[in-house]
Image (tube, rainbow, N blue to C red):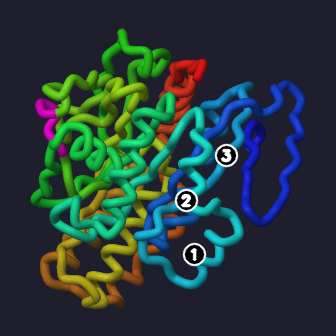
Amino acid sequence: MVGLHLDTPMADHPRTAAAGFIEPRKTCALVNNMPDGSFVQAERQFLDLLDIGSGNVGFDVRLYTMDGVPRGEATALRIAERYTPWSELFDHPPDVLIVTGANPLEPAIENEPYWTDMVQLLTWASRAVPSMLLSCLSAHAALKVFHGIEREHLPSKCTGVFAQEADSGHALTSGLGSAVVLPHSRLNTVATSAVRAAGYDVPLFSEEIGWSVATKCVERSTVVLLQGHPEYGPTSLLREYQRDIRRYVRHERDETPVLPLHCTAPQDWEQLEDLHRRIITGERDTKLFETIAFDDIESRAPWSWRPVAAQLCTNWLASVPEWSS
């Protein structure tokens, strides 16, 4: 993290500027609400994206998580060591706010255990933070809080890497080029028509699976909503699938797994597709699952959206307005 300085409650990190970088002068609050199994990965992915997108502008970063998200012992320890108490966020408004997605536990988003915290955060940030980037569930939460728009549960999980149509005249899509793809992984959606009717620009969308990025000024804040996952690494979708299919063959869950599209090297797709077909059509056997060398498949997985993600984050940070107060 060349341009980032991570403020933690347990350690003092000196602000040492690297060659070619300005001493950190902007602030970012990252609110990580991912479940324990993805908590560290999400933290690293968003920090990496912020580091790439910030260029020569340094950032002081503080990490937070909402109190209502259930935590195990190991994650609770990491939070105690690296994360700032939730209550302190509101005393120190950052220049930018990033809120990750979260594991949807309830059919109605307002019944999620952290909903009160989410409403407080978004309402406050719309008046106190120049720009916020909201991912997946937090994006759907913003549409509910700001506009009363309900998310819809999908018939099956939307997962894979999908081609995007870009609004070439929008500031967020500047420099993206012609081959634009982004990963999606979600159980819910909000229709593109509803997002546009609420006054949002939709600079990136897919005819196949809906909008990926939407943006609008709400109160005093520029809000950027992500229904896709530009922060994902090359193996993120495959690891999610491996987790889901493992639980399925072990009878830990009965919901049929969904194979993510366009997430492997060409030579690996056929065997993965064959494994999936055999398991969901009756061969629900751990021995069959263990015949696939997932580590090898992951080692060859393409990261086709990496340049798009980097440019998208660069464009977002470049567009953050300067507030005098």
Above or below: residue 72 compared with residue 124: below
- Image coordinates of residue 40 in percent, x first then y, are 58, 64
Q: Residue placed at 58% from the left, 33% from the top? A: 95
CA neighbours of label 3 inside 10 A, class few (<14), some (14 to 19), many (20+): many
For the residues labelled 1 and 2, the Cα–Cα distance comes to 19 Å
Q: Earlier in the sequence, mark 1 or mark 2?
A: 1
Question: Which amino acid type corresponds to the residue marked 2 in the rendered image?
Answer: Ser
Of 101 and 44, the residue lying toward us: 101
Tell me which label, 3 or 2, sits earlier in the chain.
Answer: 3
Residue annotated with mark 3: 61
Q: What's the residue at 59%, 38% (across, down)?
A: 94
Task: Name which residue lies at 57% across and 84% down.
Answer: 73
Indicate left or right for 105 with 148 as reference: right
In the rendered structure, which segment of residues is drawn in magenta? 190-194
Could you say whether the residue bearing mark 2 is in a helix, strand or loop? helix
- Where residue 296 appears, as percent x and y from the top left, is 53, 66
Residue 87 is tagged as 2
Distance in Å between CA atoms under marks 3 and 1: 19 Å
Helix, strand or loop at mark 3: strand
Dot 1 amino acid type = Thr
Q: What's the residue type where badge 3 is placed?
A: Val
Q: Nearer the viewer, residue 308 or 323?
A: 323
Rounded to the nearest angstrom, the CA distance separating label 3 from label 2 is 16 Å
* Residue on which the image places disc 1: 75
Are dots 1 and 2 in contact, CB under 8 Å? no
Quarter of the rendering occupied by the N terminus:
top right
Residues packed near mark 2 inside 10 Å, few (<14), some (14 to 19) or many (20 plus): few
